[in-house]
Amino acid sequence: MASLNRVFLIGNLTRDPEVRYLSSGKAVGDLRLAVSRRYKTATGEERDETCFVSVVVWGRQAETCGQYLAKGSSLFVEGRLNYEEWEKDGQKNNRLRVVADRVQFMGAPKRAEYSDSADSAAGVPARSGAREEAPAEPPPDTGNDDNLPF
Amino acid sequence: MASFNRAMLIGNLTRDPEVRATPTGISVADLRLAVNEDYKDKNGQVVKRTCFVDVVVWDKQAELCRKYLTRGSTVYIEGRLQMDEWTTQDGQKRSKIRVRADRVQFLGSPKGAGSAPQGSRDEDFPLPAEDLEEAAPVDEAG
């Protein structure tokens, strides 16, 4: 029987990735993605609609998510819908989550690996901005932001 | 900010479409889709996995769904994920992900096609395959 289950999303994280490890040593990352859409009502009014999607990332990709993503990070996710059912207090619950096959980071990483301790020492609040962009660029591109197509 | 939201599914309806109308007279169809997938686990064992997805279809397409789809029908759905939020009677917030369909493509024959009823037609499917297997050795012998 023919079957297809594919989801493509681009959105922003509503919170830092939560990465944990199974007893087997395999990493699992839980991401909460906000995907917004702007549309016009019948009266021509512009409105935003946001869809919050829970995304599960496995293995090495989960670890990279934990390392490079933070609340607000923009990312592309490709995966499948996964139906989960469980029972709590005798009540049946279910939900749909996206299990990611591919996670593509969009935009600058949250911080350069080496500046981790420096950030907290300086007491700089989590505001991203220019400070993060500099170390994020690959070396040949330094200072050439204007040429980027986005 | 860049944003993208697209889901593509092929599955079978677990029940007949439920079609209602909004107060303004627009038709809305609720479909319940079972997307079956087979995958191999670590030991090479084939495991079946079913994903149940609620799909919302609007307007003219909803009417077509009512007309042509029934429990068991195979459909291709393309649309976007949509989050619906509501508060339960005891004040708890709940949310649910559904697919809001932009495109519904009927796969397989329509329900009123005059062919064999759905149930028996499904049972007929393995037969041609068996015929082929039987035929193959004969060909080799000849």
Image (cartoon, grey):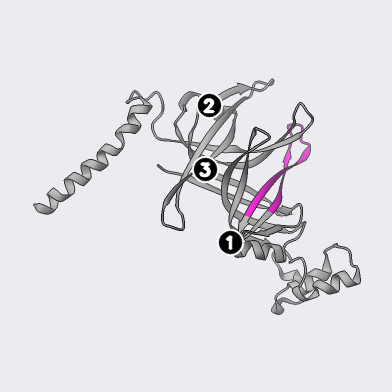
Q: Amino acid at mark 3?
A: Leu
- 3D distance between C-alphas at marks 2 and 1: 43 Å
- 3D distance between C-alphas at marks 3 and 1: 32 Å
- 3D distance between C-alphas at marks 3 and 2: 17 Å
- Counting residues from the start of the chain, the first of labels 3 and 2 encountered is 3
- Helix, strand or loop at label 3? It is strand
Residue A59 placement (x, y as % from top left): 59, 62
Compared across the picture, whether B76 is left or right of A25 comes to: left
Quarter location, residue A91: top right
Compared across the picture, whether A26 is left or right of B94 comes to: left
- Provide the residue designation for mark 1: A24
- Which portion, as a residue range, is magenta? A31-56
Residue at (77% x, 33% y) in the render = B92
Badge 1 local density, few (<14 within 10 Å), some, or many (20+)? few
- Provide the residue designation for mark 3: B9
- Helix, strand or loop at label 2? It is loop
Residue A124 placement (x, y as % from top left): 89, 67
Q: Specify the farthest residue to the right.
A: A123
Badge 3 local density, few (<14 within 10 Å), some, or many (20+)? many
